[in-house]
Every structure is written in C-alpha cells, then in structure tokens.
Image (cartoon, rainbow, N blue to C red):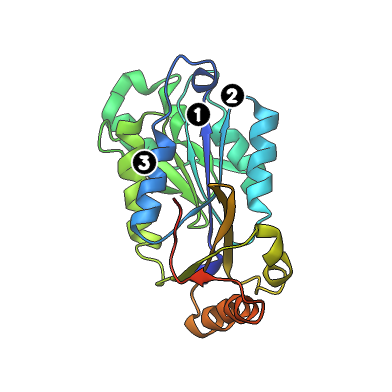
Amino acid sequence: MSNKKINFYSVIIGSELLNGRRNDAHFAFLNNELLKRGWEHKASFVIEDDINLMYDIFNLIRKDKNSVMFCFGGIGSTPDDYTRQIAAKAFTNSKMEFHKEAKQIILDKFKAEAYPHRINMSYLPINAKLLKNVVNNVPGFYLDNRFFFTPGFPSMSQSMVIEALELFFPLAKSKYRLTLTAFCGENDLIDVMLKVSKNLDLSSLPKIINNKRKVVISLAGFDKDELEKNFELFTKYLNSSKIDYVLKDISA
C-alpha cells in the first residue's frame, strides 16, 4: 500500500466501555503509536458486543481497499466473545480452523484445563497468523497482514499493537505541511478550497477575534511540488484580492 493511502481504523468492542463500567485506554495508545510513526487514524469505533453491529463495522472496513484495522476485545472463550467468529464471517467467508500453534500454546499453558472452553481461543479464521501475548502467552491474531485482533486488556493488547506496527508499518513517508493565516472570512476562500487536489489534506480553521475575522489554512501532503503548487492558489488569490495574510498559524 502507498504511504499516503493507508487508512487506519480501530474497533474497540465492549459494552462495559459504553455503560461506564470501564474507561477506554485503547484509542489513546494506538493513536499515539500511529502519530509517532507518522500515521493517522481514519476512524475509530467504540461498539457494544453486538454481532450484527460488529459484522457491519468489519464489513465496512473490509470494503476499503486501503484499510488497516486494529480490533480490541472479544477474542476470549466466554459466551460474549464473538470477535473470532464474526471476523471469520467478514474476512474469510466464515471458514475457521484450530490454529495448530495457537492450540499448542493453550495446551502448554493450561494443560487439562484447556478443555472444554479455553481451547476455543485457538479456533481462528482460516490462515490467521499470531500476535504474541507477553502477559499470559495466549495469542492475538491477524489476517492478510492488515486486520489485527487483540484482547480487550490493554496490558495484553499494547505489545501486540507495537509488534504489528513494527512488522508492517514502522514509519510513514514524510508529510510536508504549509500554513497561512488570512485576515478574512472563511467563506472568502471556499472557491479556492474547491480547487485543491484531493491528494492533499486541507484544513480550514476560522476565528473571530475582537470582531475581526481570520482563517487558518493548512495544507499537507507527501508530494512537495504538488503541495507548493496548491498552496500558491491561496497566496495568489489573497495577493490579487489585497487580503492581508501571514505564512504561519496565528490561532489566538
């Protein structure tokens, strides 16, 4: 996948997060790890343990050909752990198998107590690969080198996130950014905004300070020449319209 087209999603599963019994720690950790490497979230979902909703979200992400997903929760062996089965339904046409390595890990860990329930944690979507669990050795898993499934416990999932990022997405290509503050209303620049290349990230932050309007325009992208060419659309318009501006972010 091209650096500029990877869309990172997180899916955080747990009714206990939505009803306030627990606080989420997954989003902040993953988001920070992405930003450290030059990546950004496309979207994040916090959802209850609902098999139809889970499938719909997984399917939505699967349809994005540039998606990478980190899923947290629901890969255990209790009756409300649906993630393994729903992941198979969404990504492998419901085909599942007892993963030989995962099964042996669970047998070695729990011995006779692996049956009748814990062994099911090794029943994974077909062709799954494993993520190491540094806490109790029961692995997470991933599919197609882009869909990663980890436990709901941050102590277990965080090392898996780092393992996956280091393996497949260690560092993004450098992104360039240009910013200006124009002393006008945001509406004055909309026609220029419409001309900006879709390859670039455009943000517009309007402000009213002491009854005076100003707007911070920021463009970012991986192609420096393309970025500079599109940024000139703003500077040329502002110069021709005799609108004052400065080449930096004045947010106050």
Q: Which mark is residue 29?
A: 3
Q: Position of residue 17 (x, y in %)?
A: 49, 22
Q: Position of residue 232 (x, y in %)?
A: 57, 81
Q: Position of residue 93 (x, y in %)?
A: 68, 46
Question: Element type at marker 2?
Answer: loop
The residues tagged by marks 3 and 2 sit, at their Cα atoms, a distance apart of 21 Å
- Residue type, numbered disc 1: Gly
The residues tagged by marks 1 and 3 sit, at their Cα atoms, a distance apart of 19 Å
Taking 172 as reference, is 46 above or below it?
above
- Disc 2 designates what residue? 49
Q: Position of residue 161 (x, y in %)?
A: 37, 46
- Disc 1 designates what residue? 74
Give the residue displayed 39% in from the left and 36% down from the top: 103
Q: Earlier in the sequence, mark 3 or mark 2?
A: 3
Front-most of residues 138 and 74: 74
Q: Is residue 180 left or right of residue 153?
A: right
- Report the mark closest to the observer, 3 or 2: 3
Sort mark 2 into few (<14), some (14-19) or many (20+) by Cα contacts within 10 Å: some
Front-most of residues 17 and 95: 17
Give the residue displayed 32% in from the left and 34% down from the top: 156
Give the residue displayed 68% in from the left and 31% down from the top: 53
Sort mark 1 into few (<14), some (14-19) or many (20+) by Cα contacts within 10 Å: many
Q: Is residue 51 left or right of residue 149?
A: right
